[in-house]
Amino acid sequence: MSQETTATKQEEQKTSELQQQKKEEQKPQQATTTTKEEKKTKPEKENFEMVINFRRVIMGRKTTRTKRAIKYVRYMVKRHFGAEKVIIDPLLAKAITMNGRDKIVRRVRIAVKRIGEKTYLARLAIKSE
C-alpha cells in the first residue's frame, strides 16, 4: 500500500510541475518600456562599409549632381549612424566625379569610421581581394 501511495504522489508532483511550466509559458512576457531617447540612439558602430546607390541623385539637373551626391552621402551616414557631423574624404569626392561633374558614378562603396563622439569620416573603400 505504501508503494502505491508514493507512486501516486510522484505522479501528482510531476503533473503539477508540468502544469506550472505550461502556465509560465502561456504568461505574456512583460514588455519593457523604452523612452523616445533610447529609440533615437543608433547602435554604436566603429568601422563599417556600405554601398551607396546614386539613382536618386542622377535624376535631375546635370549641373547640380555632384553637390547632391555629396549631400546624399552625408544624409545616408547621418541616417545609419546617428551622426551630427560627417567629414567627406577628398578622395571620395574625387571618385564620385571621376567621369566629370555632370556624369557621376552610379554607386560607390564607402568605409565609415568613427572619429569623435558623434563625428564620422566617410572614405572610399578599396576592395581587398
Image (cartoon, rainbow, N blue to C red):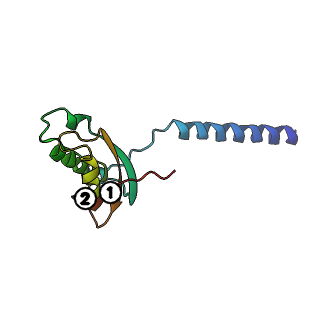
When asked about the image quadrant of residue 12, the answer is: top right
Q: Label 1 belongs to which residue?
A: 123
Residue 114 can be seen in this image: yes
Helix, strand or loop at mark 1: strand
Give left or right: position of 49 versus 36: right
Instruction: Name above or below for residue 68 compared with residue 116.
Output: above
Q: At 32% from the left edge and 53% from the top edge, which residue is drawn?
A: 42
Give left or right: position of 38 versus 67: right
Q: At 81% from the left edge and 39% from the top edge, which residue is drawn?
A: 7
Q: Amino acid at mark 2?
A: Pro
When asked about the image quadrant of residue 13, the answer is: top right
When asked about the image quadrant of residue 59, the answer is: top left
Q: Position of residue 6 (x, y in %)?
A: 81, 42
Rate crowding at label 1 as few (under 14), some (14 to 19) or many (20 or more) other CA atoms within 10 Å: some
Q: Position of residue 18 (x, y in %)?
A: 65, 38
Residue 76 can be seen in this image: no
Helix, strand or loop at mark 2: helix
Q: Label 2 belongs to which residue?
A: 90
Front position among marks 2 and 1: 2
Q: Residue furthest top?
A: 59
Q: Which residue occupies the foreground of this view, 71 or 116?
A: 71
Q: Position of residue 92 (x, y in %)?
A: 28, 54
